[in-house]
Amino acid sequence: MRRPLVRLLRLTGPFRWSMVMAVVLGAATVGSGIALMATSALLISRAALRPSIADLSLLVVGVRFFGIARGILRYLERYVSHDVGLRLLAQLRVWFFEIAEPLAPARLISHKSGDLLTRAVADIETLKDLYVRMVAPPAVALIIAVAVGLYLWRFDPWLAVVWLGFFLAAGVAVPVIARLASRRPGAALIATRSDLQAHLVDSLQGMAEVVAYGQTRRRSEEVRATAGSLAAAQRRMAWIGGLQSALGSLVTNGAVLAVLVLAIPRVETGRLEGVHLAMLVLLAAAAFEAVVPLGPALQALEGVLAAARRLFALADTRPAVSDPLSPLPLRPTADGGGLEVRNLRFTYADGEPPALRGVSFSLPPGRRVAVVGPSGAGKSTLVNLLLRFWDYTEGEILLHGVDLRRYAQEDVRRIFSVIPQQAYLFSGTVRENILLAKPEATEEEVEAAARKAQLQAFVQSSPLGYDSWVGEGGLRLSGGERQRLALARVLLRDAPIVILDEPTANLDPLTERALLDEFWEALAGRSILLITHRLVGLDAMDEILVLRSGRVIERGRHDTLVAAGGWYARMKQLQDRHTASTPVP
């Protein structure tokens, strides 16, 4: 992986002129503070000699000017620099989504959801320090070093050389010491924070299971141990920060003392006017304001680099599927030969047995095909290949007579609508969740889709109607209502091919049969691919494929397969017995 700091700085390109403006304002702010101290010291020194008011008027005006200017410039500098930081933060969040989206789901399944959340939120939040703490302060310090060094040189070269030595010690040596000391605890802080967040997300998502199995105490101890490690890393970083601050103060006081030691003999010998002594001392001390941010900046650098490495590790991950260089156009309304799968073979990783072996079927417009089989037979793998989440190893998937891989992924997915086993519902309203399929849809289109999906009864039973809150993950809805809402999405999208992936797996037999009947009625005229291990409602299918260990072992219509007495017939008989023994609610 290329150097993360260089890559981060490249991301700031769109804001370079705002960054330059912030640096100029920052240097002007610090310069005003230095000028205020120097002018005040010179005013007091000259006033001690009791000159006329006219002789002091310029210095009085200077003190007022620099005092007012410092406040105004500080406000402008903070405004511009934080505007840059926040806009950079917004860009990084969009950038993260853009790099993560092509990796889903194939390349993200190895990451914990809590770890991804940490990268998307905490790691990117850490990067907001990139400009505010790591780009602008060194530039401001360099400008101040040159300006103050040249000013001191006018009075005495040795004053400039000695002061610059202390300035470099405070601005370079002390921060480098802090940087080296914070390298390991800074990296540990990022890693431990990620572990803690991942553990908390897992614990909260699985809270019901944790309580049911009596593991509350154990999970609490695990969280406490991880939180303790995080606190230890934070204490270490705080100790290093305190040490850096103390060393910085020591160097600043040393610079003041050195300037005094050099300047006093020069005043005694007449090489330096006495009224300039206090001014030079206060100027030398005030200039160290420019290096104060450098220590914390370098101390935080390891955390920023660790966060950047984690983000760029994800960015450098190669997607499992990529678009062709010149994709063919694909329109959902185009007429053609529908979908055809020929001798499909797929293996997830080298050395593993194939998940699919020689699977073939066709799905012309308006046809209904079911793929059934036990868990692990390869049914979900087939769906992932159709949606181009993975690319098949051998064989072909033809859409309108053209290999699927010659189209852009986004275009392919517009052809399909999917009702999964657990349709994900966002924490929002019924309307917002339906509009996921077609954000620009009108109110009439939303209501028509909901009505056709038999969702009207639920909507009308709520006083808020379509503005009813579904809860996080749709917790306020029953299983049937969740699937009807998913059906409403499909109907609103109006894609020509619908994939039903175990749509009734968690429903009772009566609800299952009723929901399937609603599906067939609502989806009349669409091409339907039903993926299921439940042999219910399959008499409505034009063809049924029985998949086992990645192979098609039987195929035909429902009646034909039952009469054949094979695997399908045996499983149908077992499921019918189970359904008959299940009490009717």
Image (cartoon, grey):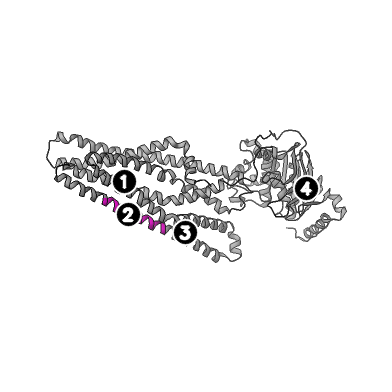
Where disc 1 sits, the SS reads: helix
Alpha carbon of mark 4 to alpha carbon of mark 1: how far?
71 Å
Q: Are marks 3 and 4 in contact (CB under 8 Å)?
A: no
Residue 430, percent across and down? Answer: 61, 44
Between the residue at mark 2 and the residue at mark 4, the CA separation in whole angstroms equals: 71 Å
Q: Secondary structure at mark 2?
A: helix
Question: Which is closer to the viewer, label 3 or label 1?
Answer: 1
Q: Is residue 464 visible?
A: no
Q: Main secondary structure of the magenta part?
A: helix
1 vs 2, front mark: 2
> Do labels 3 and 1 touch, CB within 8 Å?
no
Of label 3 and label 1, which has the lower sequence position? 3
Q: Which residue in the protein does label 4 denote? A: 359
Q: Quadrant of residue 54?
A: top left
- For the residues marked 2 and 3, what is the alpha-carbon distance in whole angstroms? 26 Å
* Residue type at numbered disc 2: Leu
Image disc number at residue 230: 3
Pick whichever of labels 1 and 2 is earlier in the sequence: 2
Which residue occupies 62% across, 40% down? 435
Label 2, residues with CA under 10 Å away: few <14, some 14-19, many ≥20: many
Amino acid beneath label 1: Glu
Numbered mark located on residue 289 in the image: 1
What residue is shown at x 76% (from left), y 52% (from top)?
550
Q: How many marks?
A: 4
Residue stretch rendered in magenta on the structure = 236-254
- State which tag comes first along the sequence, 3 or 4: 3
**Callout 4 amino acid:** Val
